[in-house]
Image (cartoon, rainbow, N blue to C red):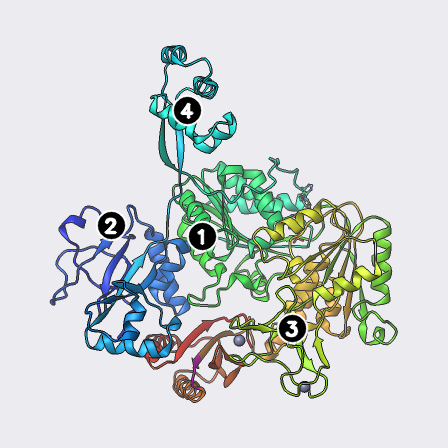
Amino acid sequence: MQTDKPFTYKVDEHLRNRISIGMRVIVPFGKGDRLIQGFVVRIFDNPKYQGQLKKIISVIDLAPVLNQECLKLAEWMAQETFSFRITCMQAMLPSAMRAQYQKKLVLLSNDINKDVKSFFSGEGEKDFDEQKIPTRILGQLIKARQQNKVEIRYTVKDKARVKKIIAIKSILTEASVVKERALLRANADNLKKLLKFLESHPNEMMPQRKVEKATNLSSNVLRTGEKKGWLTREKIEEYRDPRKNLNITRTLPKMLTSQQNQAVETVVSEMKREKATTFLLQGVTGSGKTEVYLQVIANALTNKKTALMLVPEIALTPQMVERVTSRFGKKVALLHSGLSSGERFDEWRRIEKNEAQVVVGARSAVFAPLKNIGVIIIDEEHEASYKQDNMPRYHARDIAKWRAKYHHCPVLLGSATPSLESRARAQKGVYRWLHMDTRVNQQPLPQVTVIDMRREAHFSNNMNFSKAMLTNIQQTLERDEQIILMLNRRGYSSFMMCRDCGFVLKCPNCDISLTLHMDTHSMKCHYCGHEEPIPRSCPSCNGSRIRYYGTGTQQVETELKKIFKQAKILRMDVDTTRRKGAHKRILDKFGQHEADILLGTQMIAKGLDYPNVTLVGVLNADTALGMADFRASEKTFQLLTQVSGRAGRADKMGKVIIQTYNPDHYAIKLAKEQNYELFFRKEMSIRHQGVYPPYYYTVQITASSRDEDQAAKKMYQIYGEIKKHLSQQAVVLGPTPQAVARINNRYFYQIIVKYKHENKLFAYLDEVLHKSQKDERDGIKIMIDREPLNFV
Ligand SMILES: Nc1ncnc2c1ncn2[C@@H]1O[C@H](COP(=O)(O)OP(=O)(O)OP(=O)(O)O)[C@@H](O)[C@H]1O
Ligand SMILES: [Zn+2]
Ligand SMILES: [Zn+2]
């Protein structure tokens, strides 16, 4: 019943020399002895367990994939995040190394009915996926299984594959070249060519496709060469290279400004003293934080150490990847979701074998198997994407701090708009605080104008643009400078409504309206993936007056094209960036000034550094303010400050125009002034009054079930119990249904506990976690999330 613990297996004689701690193994598990992938965490003689031990079926790895550090970290992490230990271990490995299970049905008897027969269609075994089999046939299969005519078999597949290519090597000596040439017929041009090539590459191992390209010879000719004993052809391993499309020109360290220098020196000195100090580098946009990171990393390498650098959703910031790779070349390994699983697997192995000493990656790269780490850097530390929102629900910042202690190295958190949590810790002296308050270009931060859209709307025909915005775009275009326009889509979607009866098209599986997608011409649910065609008439009243609400980037693009006929526009949103590498193509084009306007969602707000951008426009600042999330103001302030920071980063002055319906809101007013410090003080006092983080800790407990009653009941039961384990000081919110109460036909109920010090709370939550394995069998899923970032 309680499976979150190590189990003991017998190691057969033939495996004894092969097995060691940290390797993956395949073992039979549970009543049906289905095969699953496990990890070896301890090897010992004389087990206490008296019964018959099951045997390890096979060992997957030749060398351990989890080292001592990982195993210790997994143990800590499981406790800290209320996760299962094995889930934590799996999270540390590239997806290709996580087990993929396959269920097969095996036919044991021929005395079967026609439904079962049709399922097997003449074969002895078939892949089996309950979801894809019609209910009637599934029923027959279950019956056949009960009669022992059919058996379910589980297999474990390891997807981690090494890529092999064919390589060619000349084995001719100088003397034999002469001899072979003499033997060739006069018209054997191809062979002559090959012989010449081999002569000039003695003993060199070369990929066959390169040889083919260099000589313009076909593989047939090469095979003839092999038969003649001129060359060998063999399979060698080749890494898949995610860097092949990057523009890499080697860059040299820049002369640091005095503020940058101060920051680098301070971090490096802690690195040399092997102190696990956490730094908060608070530097305004354009203050040159990246150069600080690069020089700290360079120092780590000089000291024979490695460096780990995390960036948010790296696929979105190809500029950052290029900057690091341009400085450190082949020493860099990349780990992020934009890579194929094969590429990730290869990068992981390069790190593991110490062939790469600098890792740049998104959240899960925090587990990169680096040894001897000299510094861990987290750029844009306030970003929500550093928190994983399924089990294990870890925050990369916490893992980084744990690893820093293990390696005795500093952590450097950087941001222009730190999270309130980190900024408060810097204030208290828990983190060391580094400031950079001027831009590298010595220019002031761009000037921000806020436009009150409540007044504009009446005068303008163009729904999305104020007069000031249009004038400024026009002027910027005339100066041949570039513009970034952001359409904020957080907490906001485009939906379809009937103007006659008010009908809104909703997802059949979730309590949320469907979103219009013009690229696929369909209505989609962002929660469960349900998709259906765009209705031509109202499904409810059959009327034809259907309106599509909400402004999409596409609609804005059309409007822009009408107004500025000459301007070249690039659009960046989920629709235009779906294909691999699309982000980079769009940004490269913009960087080369092949377009004047970059129009996008909040994915364009961060990290971009283009010297010719002098105008930034925010079309709708306030969509996030309406959300029932206590972090709404913080997120809005951060987003506006970040996007404003894209303007005027080189020698030209920048300008920002923000359109809003809430010009008096403090988040907007202070973003206009780009006054982080004032915002911090104001927001802290609001959090204090509201009993919210960073003054209080939070934990969210959620129960979900296909049966609404069951989910609610479970939540009320937990609520009743948890109260008994809390002091007077703690506050419990709920139980309430979640903001989207039903997702994929499951109902969600939650409570949120706000607390300061509660010594019995964690023991109780542990109990909830362990009981959840039983709940799961009753169809209830329990989730425990510490410091949740999405509060609704
Ligand atoms: N010491 C320096 N000398 C000259 N140029 C520099 C120096 N440091 C940084 N730069 C340049 O200044 C620009 C801004 O730096 P960078 O992009 O690192 O800022 P940032 O602090 O990361 O800003 P943001 O938070 O807005 O992303 C870049 O083009 C960078 O190459
Ligand atoms: Zn209608
Ligand atoms: Zn749905």
Of the pair 62 and 206, the residue shown nearer to us: 206
Which secondary structure, mark 1?
A: helix
Q: CA distance from mark 3 to mark 2?
A: 52 Å
Residue holding disc 4: 204
Q: CA distance from mark 3 to mark 1?
A: 31 Å
Q: Quadrant of residue 433?
A: bottom right
Q: Is 350 within the magenta?
A: no
Q: Quadrant of residue 641?
A: bottom right
Which secondary structure dominates the residues rendered in magenta? strand
**Disc 3 to disc 4: CB gap under 8 Å:** no
- Which stretch did the figure color magenta? 703-707
473 lies above or below 465? above
Label disc, if present, on residue 218 of the rendered structure: none
Of the pair 604 and 101, the residue shown nearer to us: 101
Q: Amino acid at mark 1?
A: Ser
From the image, which quarter does the N terminus lie in?
Answer: bottom left
Q: CA distance from mark 3 to mark 4?
A: 59 Å
**Disc 4 to disc 1: CB gap under 8 Å:** no
Residue 40: tell me if it is visible: no
Q: Nearer the viewer, mark 2 or mark 1?
A: 1
